[in-house]
Image (cartoon, grey):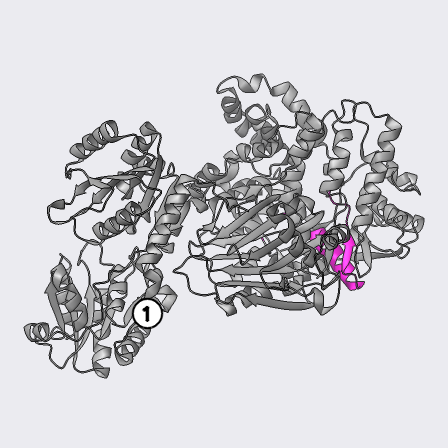
Amino acid sequence: MRMLALVTDGFGGAGGIARFNQDLLQACSELDEIDEVVVLPRYGDTEHQSLPQKVQQLPPQPSRLGYVTGALKAVRHAGPFDVVFCGHLYQAPLAAILAKIGGGALWLQLHGIEAWMGPSRLCRWAAERAALVSAVSRYTRRRFLAWAMVTPERVRVLPNTVHDRFQPGPKPQSLLGRYGLEGKRILLTVGRLAAAEQYKGHDKVIGALPALLGEFPDLRYLIAGSGDDAERLRGLARSLGVEQQVQFLGDVDDKELVEVYHLADAYVMPSTGEGFGIVFLEAAACGIPVVGGNRDGSLDALVNGQLGAAVDPDDQASLVRAIVHAVESGRRPNAYLSRFSRSNFYGQVQRMVQLIDNPERVLSV
Amino acid sequence: MCGLAGIFSYHYAAPQVDRDELQRIRDHMAARGPDGQGEWFSDDGRVGLAHRRLSIIDLTERGAQPMATADGSLVVTFNGEIYNYRVLRQQLEDKGYQFYSESDTEVLLHLYADRGEDMVHELRGMFAFALWDSRKQALFLARDLYGIKPLYYADDGWTLRLASQVKALRAGGRIADDLNPAGSVGFYLFGSIPEPHTIYQEIRALPAGTTLWVDATGPGTPRPYSTIAGIFTGAQGAAESTSLQDVQIQVQEALQDSVAHHLVADVPVGAFLSAGIDSGALVGLMRDAGQSDIQTVTLAFEEFHGRAENEAPLAEAVARQYETRHTTRVVTRTEFEADMPKILEAMDQPSIDGINTWFVSKAAQELGLKVAISGLGGDELFGGYPSFGEIPRWVRTLAIPSRIPFLGDIFRRIMTPLCRVTGHNPKVAGMLKYGGRYAGAYLLKRGLFMPWELPAVLPRDTVREGLRRLVPVEHVDALLSPDPRYAFARVASLEAGVYMRNQLLRDTDWTSMAHSLEVRVPLVDATLLRRLAPFLCRESRSTTKQSLARAPKQLLPSEVRARAKTGFTTPVMDWLQASSVLKPWERVAPLRSTHCPWARRWAYTIGDDALA
């Protein structure tokens, strides 16, 4: 099988979607069913990253027009392809057209919030032509099925996997010193601070701090990540009199991310907009107890509350209870993490590839 | 009979089966199976099957479910009856399979071991089951050709849940609330929910006559193993030269055979009796099959006393003829009003019918019956509905004009307001648009609301999305694949595949099960259909309701044979009209019109409660 992968972020790219695409394409390339994968990214430079065998990545095309031209060229020169993988819903129209021209099957990947509301008619048309849709979580799948007329058995769940570099470790002295956190108990959230989104639940955690400080007077809340919502959050902290306890770390270098997790006594993110919430897995892999929301894709990462607590983000009392419990339970390896192992992820990718090869697949009897 | 439930955590990320959830699903169906309950879990905790039992064949503990093979490799939970289980058992024993019970359930296990999924072709009866094959690590689901027994499943992308009832799945507490617009639209178009849709997005019916595999990838696509249209298509021309006398003999034999099979039970089998041919002939055939003690029950209403609608006198005549122990059960308005909350609670999915079956089932339960024979399906099999004449006539007349582009739509737009003024049935406006093909004409004939009327009762978004997903005419048309060509066979396929499957059989299931009563339908039987289809498809069709009337050795009373078809009427309509609480329809202008058919108001009353 030859596969063309249209992705926003390919090899060499940074961020959650880039990571997912890299894991997925790597897994595909290791399958016997796949002969070749041609990747066309909008962003991603492979200068510093080696590519898996069978994978060829075309130069990134950041402009829209350039991307379309590049895709058409790829089909003309490197086609035909049996499968057109579409890494983001907004690329679905192009992917659907390419699949139609080339006679291949369309495989659409859904991440999160982009697939929750009905998109443009064109996107919907394209999505409904997919032979296979893989959604990162049950929640994303459910929201997608609410607007897309696709038979449910064509929409499968392909969760994130967590990398080996996330491992338990002691609190790093260097960071404790840098941020003045010696002897403090630490809550952590990692994520964008986007004013337009405001769904990660930073404000819910800040709102819970006065009650939490009653339990743990030495508590600090670290917010890793940057964005235009920081001012609002600072204001909120001030108004509640907890500005001393909230520390904004700004963007964390990817190399330092594991150490930042190691600072925490609990990872807290009562979000209402997660497609999945890979950060829960990363924190749990570092041995940190996690607390998340129960209304979105977080439930998948939290395994319905088994990997970590899943609480109603709007229920402050529950949130406080869950955080207290998490901090008191202490850091330890998480038994539920193995579900999201690399081998499970690879197995699921293989099932997806077999499905797209034979959508009417039935078991041999 | 019974209720089945199951949870399969097929995805590697899914938590193990929640035992409490499985019990909640199972025990919501307590009335389906008051005699026992059971559950089974795989060693790894990823599969759980459960069962509520109404014991009818092999009343001992050995017949309990879920039932496993001796080596534990196969486990089944099953709702229904396999009427040919004794023959199948004999064949399997001859091959060396060892049986530990006298039940039909155990036959399913060994038959699967022997034939794999092709086993479904061997089964005569009504069934829905889930069978876990531990070697394949896969779950096999199947449902009978007609869809007599229900089977619903919900897949959230990690976990598959299944049960005999939609409300049971919901009682588990893990099904998303999202409504399915195709279910809502389907309800107002047909008066019942067209499968595979349900009112919930996440829950689907396993279509009648299909099987489904679920493995680590999740559920596959349901695969049909037989269709009614296919049976008709295969039968054509097979009996053109049979003499009329031979036809009647063969029809009689086929009917006797079906009734005899439907009497297999270790408890007494009673019968619903009306003044019609279907139920009366079945009681006669029960007598022919050798059943000496037959308990029969008829509904009567004080309002009908002394009127033609009163079925009691004729039913009593039939009962005397066949010497049954007969009960006429009078239902009053007071009782109806007292039962109404229970009816709405038991109604698994919105339906505009089922009230009569509710009370006749209740009456049968009061008499201590666990099993009753019903004449359901006689009209679908022998062409008893007016639709068998009207639909082919409409199609003949309208086939050509309906092909003229836009004419149907223009006519519809002009006629809709006219019908409102003149008080004509709004369906008249759709004649040109839909009447030119069978599926469209069927929608006209059986439809409750027409597609363009839906915005009066549902939000516009729901209507648009629901119609886009359901595509009503295509939905109906799919039942004519393969096309049986003969007018009779086409209408029969549609009546059995839409009205009987989604309305009559569903209503019979939830109303009878609410009273822990198994209803058996000898006229809804794949083997019977295969035997009769060649005669039903003959150019000069002589096999009619009268063939059924003539089937018992001792003929039905002549008044019954000659009685014009009235349908089974009740004064329920008047009761509902008079009821002060059930009037949400008064909020909707078109439903207030004096010309508005009562069924539409009733539909809105039900839909307003269930689809809000």
Percent from the top left, x then y, of residue A49? 14, 49
Location of residue A260 with respect to B600 vertically, above or below? below
* Furthest residue in direction left, as rendered: A178
Does A93 sit left or right of B80 as displayed? left
Mark 1 is on which residue type? Gly
Q: Quadrant of residue A194?
A: bottom left
Where disc 1 sits, the SS reads loop
Percent from the top left, x then y, of residue A136? 33, 53
Percent from the top left, x then y, of residue A168? 22, 71
A276 within the magenta span = no
Does B12 sit left or right of B359 as displayed? left
Does B246 sit left or right of B369 as displayed? right
Numbered-mark total: 1
Which residue: 53% across, 49% down?
Answer: B213
Residue B51 can be seen, yes or no: yes
Which residue: 35% across, 33% down?
Answer: A104
Residue position marked by numbered label 1 in the rendering: A308
The chain to which mark 1 is attached is: A
Q: Quadrant of residue B336?
A: bottom right
B357 within the magenta span = yes
Location of residue B224 with respect to B176 vertically, above or below? above
Which residue: 82% across, 60% down?
Answer: B268
Percent from the top left, x then y, of residue A116? 33, 49
Q: Which residues make up the magenta segment?
A: B349-377
Of residues B535 and A29, the one drawn nearer to the viewer in this rendering:
A29
* Furthest residue in direction front, as rendered: B96
- The residue carrying pointer 1 sits among few (fewer than 14), some (14 to 19) or many (20 or more) residues within 10 Å by Cα, namely many
Location of residue B121 with respect to B51 vertically, above or below? above
